Amino acid sequence: MRYVLSNLGQGLRRNTSMHLAVILTLFVSLTMVGTALMVRSQAEKTVDQWGSELQITVYLCRADDSNARCLGEVSNEEKRAIGQVLDDSAQVDSWELESKAEAFEKVKELYSDDADRFEGENAVLTEDDMPESIWVTLKSPDQFEAVTSAVAGLDGVSSVRDQRQTINPLLKIMSGMQVGSLAIAVALIIAALLLVANTIRLTAFARRKEIGIMRLVGASGAYIALPFLLEVLVTTLVAVGLAVGTLAGFMFFGVQRVFSQYLGFIPWIGWEDWAFASIVVAILGPVLSLVPTLLLTSKYLKV
Amino acid sequence: MIRFEKVSKSYPGGGAPALDQVSIDVEKGEFVFLVGASGSGKSTALRLVLREARPTSGRVYVAGKEINRLAGWKVPRLRRQIGTVFQDFRLLPNKTVAENVAFALQVTGYSPKEIRSRVPETLEMVGLDGKADRMPDELSGGEQQRVAVARAFVTRPMILVADEPTGNLDPGTTVGIMKLLDRINRTGTTVLMATHDHGIVDQMRKRVVELEHGQVVRDQDRGVYGFQH
C-alpha cells in the first residue's frame, strides 16, 4: 500500500503539466455538461410556467373578470363548447384544462421568495382570483392563428395568450446553450481522453523497467494498474471538484444574484437542480476517465 | 517440476520454428544447463516456462500445471513460484540494494515485518551483507548480479530460471555466481540455466540439454558443453 501511494505521488509529480492539462480539459468539459443540464432544467421550468412554443393558453372567464365580454364565471356548457371546437380543429394536437388550484400553485412558485403573501386572511391573491385556463398544444408552431381566432370569439373565453413572442426567444437561447455546451463538452471530453491515454503511455514508458520486474516477480495485474488508475482518479476528482464549484458559483452569482432579480417573470432553477447536475458530473467524470484507463492499462501493461 | 511435451513454437513471420517438437523433463531439485548457439531456442524455452509466450503446439507443465491453458489472471501466481535472473541484471537504478530485493516482496503482498526479516537474510546468503544501502551503480557487475539473484530468491521460489546470468561477467566473478546458484540448488530449488559459457558447464558437471535449430540434440547427465566421444 505504501508502495502504491508513493508511486501515486511520484506519478503525479512526474507528469505535472500533463495532469494539469487533463484536469483543465476535464474541468471545462464537465462544467459544460453541468451547464447543459442546468439549462435543461431551466427550460423545463420555463415551459411549465409559460407553455412551450407549441402551446397557446386560453384563459377562461372569472367571476369578476376585467374583460367586458365575460358575463361571470365560465359555465360548464361553455367549457364543453370550447373543448368541442378544439377537438374539431385539425391543428390541435391535444389540450388540457388547468384548474384554479394549479394556476395558484404556479403563481406561488414564481413568487416563492415571499410565499407568506399568499397565506391567511389578508392574502394578496387567493385561489378564487385565478382564472381557469385551457392549455392547447398545437401540431405545428406556425398554425396558431387559426386556432386563436376560432377560440377567441367563443363565450366564456377571456383572452388567448400566445407564448411565441415572449418565450420563444428565451427557449431558443436555452436550447442553443444546451446544444452548444454539449458540443463543446463532447469535443473537450475527447481531448481529455486523448490526454489521459497519452499520460498513461508516457507513465508506462517511464516505468517500463519497474513494470517489467513487477510482472516477472508475479505482481498481479490489478496491482500494476492500480497506480495508474489512482493517478487518473485523483486528476478526475480535482476536475469534478472544480466543475461543481464553478456551477455553484454560476448558480449563486448568476442565477440567484442577477437573473432571478431582473428576470423575475420566469421561475429560476434552484440548488436542487445544481445538486442534480453536480451528481451527474461527479458520476460521469470518473466513468469517462476510468473506463478508458482500464482498457488502456490492460493494453499497455499486458501480463 | 518442468516438463515440455512435444513443444513447438514459431513466431509469426519467422521462417523456421524457434522450437521444434521439444520434449524435456526436469525433476524437482535438478540443476539443468540449457546450451546451444544464439538462436537455438534457449530463450524461447525459458519464455515458455515463464508464460511470457505460449507454445504453438505441445504442452508445457510447470509444477504439475499445464501452463499454456492457464488463465491470464493466474499467470502472476505462476511467476511467484519462479525466480528469474537475466544477463542484464535488471535492477532499479533509483533504489538501494535492499530496496531492490524488497521490491519483489512488496509488489507481491508480503508484510513489512516479513520483508524486514527476509531481505537481510537473503542479502547475507548471496554475500552482500553490509552493502544493503548501496545504489546499484556503486556495485561491480558481479555484485549487481548477486542483488538480482537475491531478488529472484528472496521469495524462496520452487524454480530459478537464469538466462545467461554470467554473460556480462568476467571469469572470476562468474565462478562466484555459479557457486551461489549451486547453493540455491542445494536448498531444493530447481535451477534451469541457459548459457553458452563452455567453461562453467564443463566445470559444474550437471545435466546438459543442448538445443540446435530448435531441436534437442543432446540430453546428458553430468555433461560438458561440447560432445565427448
Image (cartoon, grey):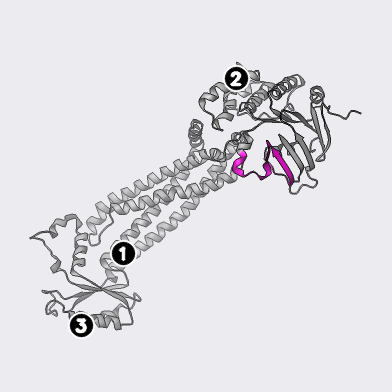
Dividing the picture into quarters, in which one does residue A144 lie?
A: bottom left
> What residue is disc 3 on?
A154
| Residue B121: numbered disc | 2
Q: Is residue A282 left or right of residue B43?
A: left
Instruction: Characterize the local packing of mark 1: few (<14), some (14-19) or many (20 or more) Cα atoms within 10 angstroms.
Output: some
Q: Position of residue B6 (x, y in %)?
A: 78, 43
Instruction: Decide: few, some or many residues near mark 2? Use Cα within 10 Å; few <14, some 14-19, many ≥20.
Output: some
Q: Going by the image, does A229 lie left or right of A132? A: right
Q: Quadrant of the C terminus of chain B?
A: top right
Image quadrant holding the N terminus of chain B, namely top right
Disc 2 is placed on an element classified as helix
- Secondary structure state at the residue bearing disc 3: loop
Nearer the viewer's eye, disc 1 or disc 2? 2
Q: Nearer the viewer, residue A63 or A206?
A: A63
| The residue positioned farthest toward the right in the image shown | B229
Residue type at the position of mark 3:
Leu
Q: Position of residue A49 (x, y in %)?
A: 26, 65
Residue designated by label 1: A170
Check chain identity for marks 2 and 3: say if they share one: no
State which mark lies toward you, 2 or 3.
2
Q: Is residue B41 visible?
A: no
- Relative to B126, is B220 above or below? below
Among the 4 quarters of the image, the one containing residue A132: bottom left
- Residue mark closest to the camera, 3 vs 1: 3
Q: Give me the residue at 56% from left, 33% from top.
A: B108
Q: Earlier in the sequence, mark 3 or mark 1?
A: 3
Q: How far is the residue under mark 3 from the one under mark 1?
A: 31 Å
Where does the magenta region start and end?
B53-75
Query: Where is residue A272 drawn, in percent x and y?
Result: 29, 53
Q: Is residue A143 visible?
A: yes
Q: Are marks 1 and 2 on the same chain?
A: no
